Amino acid sequence: MLALPACAAKAPSPDSAAVEPAEAATPDRTAAAPAAAPAPAPAPVAAAPKQEFSGQWAYRQSCGWQHSAHLELAESGSGVSGRWDDGTRARGDSGQLQGELRDGRLYLRLCSEGEADGKIRACPNYGEASAYLAREGAVLGWYRKSGDGYRPYLKLHPAGAGQAVPDDSSGCEEDAEQD
């Protein structure tokens, strides 16, 4: 479901071939001219804080469709690997994931180990990136591709040992009226 296109190198424009590098336009120094002292090195810029994605994350809803989702993420360098599952009382799917960190977001590519409905490729064939995760305080926002953009999908909570995942009861009132 999720794969990221490789960045393509931009071909030089016809006008750029006629431009000379800046050093080519600078006259050569002569022995009589003293060399300028090198400028001091700029102070190091503080790196942006690293977004932590590793660990177990979950969403649960005990009413209505009883939707649940789980992600298990392990970071290494600028990449992430792990497992996922997402489903309701009617159907669901699970599999493996790969992710790439870009601009504070973790873009995900998924493959399915279950009965995929065609939206997610069977493992080990990862699809294109069709979702991303973003840290939103203590939770992860899961956004899914929709047309040319992304739409909010779920808020995932830490789900390690001893951590209770909050129950999302939004929309349950409508379900109770329909039963």
Image (tube, rainbow, N blue to C red):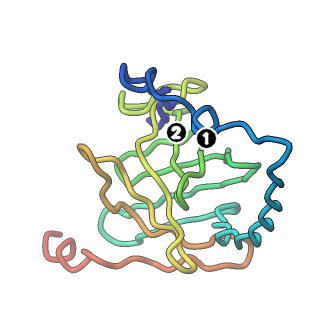
Identify the residue shown where x is 53% and y is 33%.
Answer: 111
Identify whether 8 is placed above or below 88.
above
Quadrant in which residue 160 is drawn: bottom right
Identify whether 34 is placed above or below 174.
above
93 sits left or right of 79 in the view: left
Identify whether 171 is placed above or below 28.
below
Q: Which mark is residue 162?
A: none
Q: Is residue 173 visible?
A: yes
Residue sitting nearer the eye, 114 or 109: 109
Quadrant in which residue 47 is drawn: bottom right
User: Disc 1 or 2, which lies upstream in sequence?
Assistant: 1
Identify the residue shown where x is 74% and y is 68%.
Answer: 42
40 sits left or right of 51 in the view: right
Identify the residue shown where x is 60% and y is 51%.
Answer: 101
Label 1 CA crowd tier, 10 Å (few <14, some 14–19, many 20+): many
| SS for dot 1 | strand
Residue corresponding to mark 1 = 98
Label 2 CA crowd tier, 10 Å (few <14, some 14–19, many 20+): many
Residue 8 coordinates in the image, percent (x, y): 48, 27
Amino acid type, callout 1: Gln
Mark 1–mark 2 contact, CB under 8 Å?
yes
Residue 138 coordinates in the image, percent (x, y): 57, 79
Q: Is residue 96 visible?
A: no
Residue corresponding to mark 2 = 109
Q: Quadrant of the N terminus?
A: top left
